[in-house]
Image (spheres, rainbow, N blue to C red):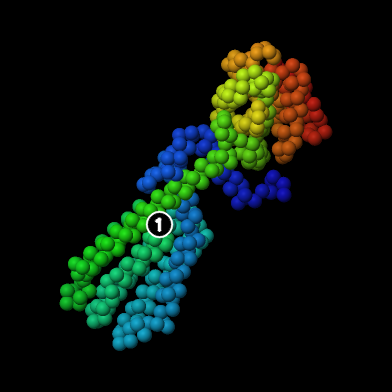
Amino acid sequence: MSNSQTPPATEALQESLLADFEDYSQQPEFVRKLDAVSRATRPTRFPGAHEQRFQSDARGAFGRIRALLCLIPMALLGSSPLWGERLLPHQSELLPLLYLGIFGLIMPCYLAAAWMQWRRPARLASEIVFILAFLVMAVALELFRQRAALEGFLLPSSLAGCALISFIIIGRMPLQDSAVFVLLYLAFIAACDAIAPEQTAAARSGMDWIVEGFFIGVMLMGSVSNEIYIRRTWAAQQLLKSLAYVDPLTGLPNRRAFEQRYELVNRHARREHKRVFFALIDMDFFKNLYDQYGHDYGDGVLVETGVVLAVFARRPLDIAARLGGEEFALLLYYCEEADGRARLEELRQQIESLRLANAGVGQGWVTTSAGGLLLPPDMPLAEAYRRADTALYEAKRQGRNRVVITNPAAALDWPEAVGPVSVSA
């Protein structure tokens, strides 16, 4: 399959992953927050938009479980014609009311909730419908209990609490949603008890309220435990992603992140009819740094280089990455060949101006060489690497500490035309 035929689902997944490594590489304080939450012993919110991402991911993770949870009461209540008369053998006047509540109210709500949780679990609307379905069942059960009491048929006061158990514990609901659900439930049953005639014995006794309160308290404690576990798990997963998409030494995106960004930027440029500039940057005489100054100094030079390089990829679709060793890559969206050459030259001068010692070679301090090209539409990444590497090799051959750019015509005539022709030093 060509790049232009990438499935929308695959592209959406890649964009999600790219958003991850952008968070990690550009927001180190977020990584520190993730580390803190992954070890927290109480529910801790994430900063800003990351909390919204967490909520969306959590809803998506439990969507299928919640959809199946909706099917359980649907199956139980849907079979009520089989057991209704046995449950209420001498209360035939209650059966039409029971069936009306089940098939006219509860079943449609659960059906809608199950469908949305199965098809669109990450949406906030799906969670709201899920909450309403269980709230409707709790209300309907309490109303039915009140109506049955008027006919002299007493049902346990904890009947509506069944909805609480399945909703909070099995549904793995967030603490905030669980608290709102419980408050609405308590407000409703308190109102029902206030207006229920005392002679029907439908109103709850003091002991019933104590049991109900203990029951709800235990469920809310379970909800708190769920909330802590889910947040810690999500934070740990995001930290693992940071290892997959961010170079741990420089904090720049790594090769994997860069290659995924390359494909997305290329597709975006093709849709918008924009040009993209691609370059490889390599440290000159880098082995000499390790030999003379040791690995700690060499790693420090890479970190300083990464800091400088990151400044040149501030726009949303630009990216600077460490590919490995002393080699870096730069991708600039909506950038013509002259602008790309100027940016690379500025980058080369800034690194040279740091005057990081590298005695015995070149000019006695750290320098870089770069090779770049203006990408034609649909150029595969492997070919872009090859052509930029050819230009980089030419920069090294001509004496290092310089920038070599391929001929714009060569890029347009790819793959026949080859060879770097433009040099700056």
Residue at screen point 42% across, 67% down: 109
**Could you say which quadrant of the image residue 171 lies in?**
bottom left
Q: Residue furthest right?
A: 416
Tell me if residue 341 can be seen. Answer: no
Along the viewing direction, whichever of 382 and 217 lies nearer the viewer: 217
- For this orientation, the residue located farthest to the bottom is 90
Indicate the quadrant where residue 394 lies. Answer: top right
The residue closer to the viewer here, 270 or 27, is 27
**What residue appears at the point 46 percent right and 41 percent down from the top-left corner?**
34
Which residue has dot 1 on it?
Answer: 173
Q: Position of residue 288 (x, y in %)?
A: 68, 20
Residue type pointed to by label 1: Met
Image quarter (top left, top right, bottom left or bottom right) of the C terminus:
top right
Q: Is residue 197 at all visible to an observer of this figure?
A: yes
Query: In the rendered view, would you say 320 is above or below 91?
Result: above
In the drawing, does residue 247 fall left or right of residue 384?
left
Q: Residue furthest left?
A: 199
**321 versus 43 height, above or below:** above
- SS at circle 1: loop
Give the x, y percent position of residue 39: 42, 43
Locate residue 370: give its quadrant.
top right
Coordinates of residue 199 in the picture (x, y in percent) = 17, 77
